[in-house]
Every structure is written in structure tokens, then in C-alpha cells.
Image (tube, grey):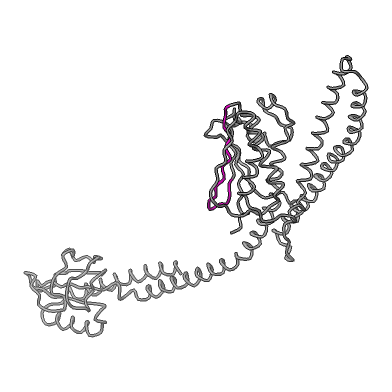
């Protein structure tokens, strides 16, 4: 239709120019009464809005016709010209916009101005243009409407896949991406991902089972070994040279058993079935109990332990014993790494995202390059090797946090040391 509009417009433009040339040639050879009668006769057979003429004397004074003034932009050279603004007149039938005009000098010395309105002649092109616009509208509007409604189903499925993926990322490897009965490309991709998840879950269970079995099976012989070493130590005198070696052996055995207990504890925390026992708990009471529990230890080390909390905090959904264990690990580490005379602060607050519990200290802090590594099992920083421990404390904290769906942020404190923040989003009730 666009090509049709262009072709018809070009053809009508040529037709208009040819008609003007014929009329110009006809009237140029007339004079006097003959010319006036011919102009009146031609006007009677034309649409008033199509054509107009004006007859002027040698001094350009109007003598006849509806055109009473020669257009300013019209040259008196006898050539057909296209004018953008045709005539400035009060007559509504005269062309005002684009028109073809010509000024010629007839045989008796008078001037004749002929004007043809392009807009009136090009009604056909306007019809085509309107049809083109309607066609575009009736194509685009239903097209956009169809696109909107057709995309809702794939988007709904993608949101379902996203929700399932978020559960998998959170650690629930038993979850799978949803499949539909259409067996389209999304189903093919979801099936491939589900097959990968099946394989990954099976491998992880195998590795976890091996580690748990090793830790569990070695705990019994280690317990017997320690008992045997302890009996031998009791039978040997305190002054014997074997006593020191036996004490060291018993200490190393205790260290191994503590590490295995830590591994089994982490494995126990990774079992998602513990969520079934979650309850509503008051975080303020938990923090007061935590502060009272560690206050004597802090005072023995000449460390100032302070609890900062609001008057009220929303209830949390979780396991109270596990949350106490996680916070106790954080406070215990802060007291252990803070030198005598330092400060440890427990700060609880809430905002639109949930409840936040921060444990800060004035100790040496955690270097930025090690803040992700400290949550890994058995990792101990250079500062950590100067203190007793196995590198499992923060791993247990991370496992408890992951079980609850919380977040753990490791950063720097205003007190000069480390700052570990337990974020509890989505677990707030009320």
C-alpha cells in the first residue's frame, strides 16, 4: 500500500501539471469577452475547491475571478509552480495550502492567474494513506495484544522455574524444575537440568556418606584408644618420662575426636528435615541470655562486653538452640581474639528487610581477602593459628545460617576489629 500511495501520488501530480499546461495554452490565445466567457464556462464545470482563477489588468488590479490578489511567491514567468502557502483570502473555497499556480499574460495585455488545489485532487492518495494507517493500526494493536497474552504463559513457567531454582540454590537439592505436558524447548532444558541435579545429588550424598561414615566409624576406635592411653597414664608415675608423651598422645586424641564431632555436627545441620521443628522465638530473650552467659568469660579476660538492643524486636521463626549455638560461636570467637582491655559489642536492630544481629570486636579483625575463606571447614587464618581451635566454628555458624535461610556478612567493625552480622530476612513474623 505504501508503494501504491507513492505511485498514485506521482501520477496525479503529473496529471495536474499537464492539465494546467493545457488550460494555460488555451487561455493564452484568447482576449476580451471571449476570454471572460471561457473562464466562466470552465469554472462552471469544475469543483469550486479544485480550481480558481483571477484576471488582472496591466497594473495588477483585479478584474474578475475569485482570486483578488496575485500570490507573493508566484513568479510572472508563465511557468507552473508549486506553492506551499497558496492564497491568503477569506473565501473558504480558495486553496490555502499546497497548490499549483501559473501567471500568464494574455493577448490583450491582461494578466491571468490559474490555481489548482493539490489537496482536492489528491483525495485518492489520502484514501490510500488512511487505509495504510488503518492497516498498520489493525496489525500492530492486535499484534501487541496477542504478544502480551501469548507471553504470559511462558513467563509464568519461567517464574515457576525461577522459584524452583532459588530453592535449589538455597541448598534443597531434592527440588526439581517443573515440567509441563507440552514437551517444548523449556521442558527439554528443564529435563536436562533435572538430570544434572539427580547426578549431583547422588554424588554429593555419596561423598557426604563416605565422610560421615569415616567420622562415625573412627570415633569408636579413637574413644577406645583414648581410654587405653588414659589407663596407661594412670598406671605410670607423674615423674616417669612416658607421662609427658602419654599426655601429648591423649591431647592429640582429644583433638581428633573434637574434629570428628565437629564434622558430624555440620553434617547433622545440613539435614533440611530439622526445619520441621522450627518455632516462633523471641530474639531479645535469646540475646539477653547470650550476654549473661558470656559476661563472666569476658570479665575474666578484662574485656568489656556490651549488648545494644531496641526495646522490641519481631519474633523469628527458627530453632532456638541452633541460633544460640551460632551466636555463641560468634561471641566466643570475638572474646577469644580480642586482647585484654578490648571491647566486644552485640548489636541488634531491625529495618524493612528484617532483623539483624551484629557481633563486633576491637581485635585484629579479618583481612578482606580471607572473609570468604573463614567460613570454609578447617580454614584458619594466620592470626587463628595463635589461638586454640579447629577451624570449624564459623563453618558450623554458616551451616546453621543456611539451614534457617538467613545470611551471614563478614566485614570490618568501627571498633577496629571484625564485624559479623546475622541477617534474618523473610523470617520475620509480625
Image quarter in which the C terminus is found: bottom right
At 76% across and 42% down in the image, what residue appears? 266
Q: Tell me residue 116's x, y (percent).
A: 25, 73
Q: Is residue 319 highlighted in magenta? A: no
Up-down: is 177 above or below 37? above
**What range of the chain is rendered magenta?**
341-356
Residue 85 left/right relative to 288: left
Q: Which of the 4 quarters of the picture holds residue 387? A: top right
Q: Main secondary structure of the magenta part?
A: strand
Q: Is residue 350 highlighted in magenta? A: yes
Q: Tell me residue 144's x, y (percent).
A: 53, 67
At 25% across and 84% down in the image, what residue appears? 45
Up-down: is 93 above or below 290? below
Judging depth in this view, the residue of 398 and 178 nearest the camera is 398
Judging depth in this view, the residue of 104 and 202 nearest the camera is 202
Judging depth in this view, the residue of 13 and 336 nearest the camera is 336
Q: Tell me residue 254's x, y (percent).
A: 82, 30
Q: Which of the 4 quarters of the picture holds residue 412? A: top right
Judging depth in this view, the residue of 289 and 279 nearest the camera is 289
Q: Which of the 4 quarters of the picture holds residue 372? A: top right
Q: Tell me residue 244's x, y (percent).
A: 85, 18
Residue 273 left/right relative to 82: right
Extreme residue in the left direction = 59
Up-down: is 333 above or below 16? above
At 66% across and 30% down in the image, what residue appears? 336
Amino acid at each position: 500500500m505504501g508503494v501504491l500511495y507513492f505511485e498514485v501520488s506521482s501520477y496525479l501530480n503529473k496529471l495536474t501539471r499537464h492539465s494546467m499546461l493545457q488550460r494555460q495554452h488555451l487561455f493564452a490565445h484568447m482576449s476580451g469577452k471571449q476570454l471572460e466567457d471561457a473562464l466562466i464556462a470552465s469554472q462552471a464545470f469544475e469543483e469550486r475547491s479544485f480550481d480558481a482563477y483571477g484576471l488582472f489588468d496591466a497594473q495588477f488590479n483585479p478584474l474578475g475571478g475569485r482570486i483578488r490578489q496575485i500570490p507573493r511567491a508566484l513568479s510572472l514567468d508563465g511557468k507552473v509552480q508549486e506553492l506551499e502557502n497558496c492564497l491568503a483570502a477569506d473565501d473558504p473555497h480558495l486553496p490555502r495550502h499546497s497548490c499549483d499556480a501559473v501567471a500568464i499574460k494574455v493577448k490583450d495585455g491582461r494578466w491571468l492567474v490559474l490555481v489548482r488545489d493539490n489537496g482536492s485532487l489528491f483525495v485518492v492518495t489520502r484514501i490510500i494513506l488512511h487505509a495504510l494507517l488503518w492497516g498498520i493500526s489493525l496489525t500492530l494493536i492486535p499484534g501487541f495484544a496477542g504478544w502480551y497474552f501469548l507471553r504470559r504463559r511462558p513467563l509464568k513457567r519461567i517464574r515457576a522455574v525461577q522459584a524452583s531454582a532459588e530453592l535449589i540454590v538455597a541448598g534443597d537439592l531434592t527440588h526439581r524444575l517443573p515440567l509441563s505436558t507440552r514437551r517444548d524447548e523449556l521442558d527439554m532444558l528443564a529435563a536436562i537440568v533435572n538430570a544434572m541435579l539427580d547426578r549431583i545429588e547422588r554424588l554429593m550424598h555419596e561423598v557426604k556418606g563416605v565422610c560421615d561414615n569415616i567420622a562415625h566409624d573412627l570415633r569408636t576406635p579413637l574413644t577406645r584408644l583414648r581410654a587405653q592411653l588414659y589407663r596407661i597414664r594412670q598406671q605410670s608415675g607423674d615423674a616417669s618420662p612416658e607421662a609427658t608423651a602419654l599426655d601429648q598422645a591423649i591431647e592429640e586424641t582429644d583433638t581428633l575426636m573434637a574434629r570428628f564431632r565437629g564434622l558430624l555436627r555440620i553434617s547433622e545441620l545440613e539435614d533440611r528435615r530439622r526445619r520441621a521443628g522450627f518455632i516462633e522465638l523471641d530474639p531479645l530473650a535469646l540475646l539477653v541470655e547470650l550476654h549473661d552467659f558470656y559476661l563472666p568469660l569476658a570479665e575474666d579476660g578484662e574485656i568489656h562486653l556490651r549488648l545494644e538492643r531496641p526495646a522490641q524486636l519481631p519474633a523469628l521463626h527458627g530453632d532456638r538452640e541452633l541460633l544460640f549455638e551460632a551466636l555463641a560461636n560468634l561471641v566466643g570467637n570475638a572474646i577469644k581474639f580480642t586482647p585484654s582491655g578490648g571491647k566486644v559489642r552485640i548489636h541488634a536492630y531491625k529495618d524493612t528487610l528484617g532483623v539483624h544481629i551484629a557481633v563486633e570486636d576491637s581485635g585484629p579483625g579479618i583481612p578482606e581477602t580471607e572473609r570468604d575463606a573463614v567460613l570454609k571447614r578447617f580454614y584458619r587464618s594466620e592470626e587463628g593459628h595463635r589461638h586454640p581451635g579447629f577451624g570449624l566454628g564459623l563453618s558450623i555458624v554458616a551451616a546453621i545460617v543456611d539451614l534457617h535461610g538467613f545470611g551471614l556478612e563478614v566485614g570490618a567493625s568501627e571498633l577496629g576489629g571484625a564485624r559479623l552480622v546475622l541477617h534474618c530476612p523473610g523470617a520475620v513474623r509480625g
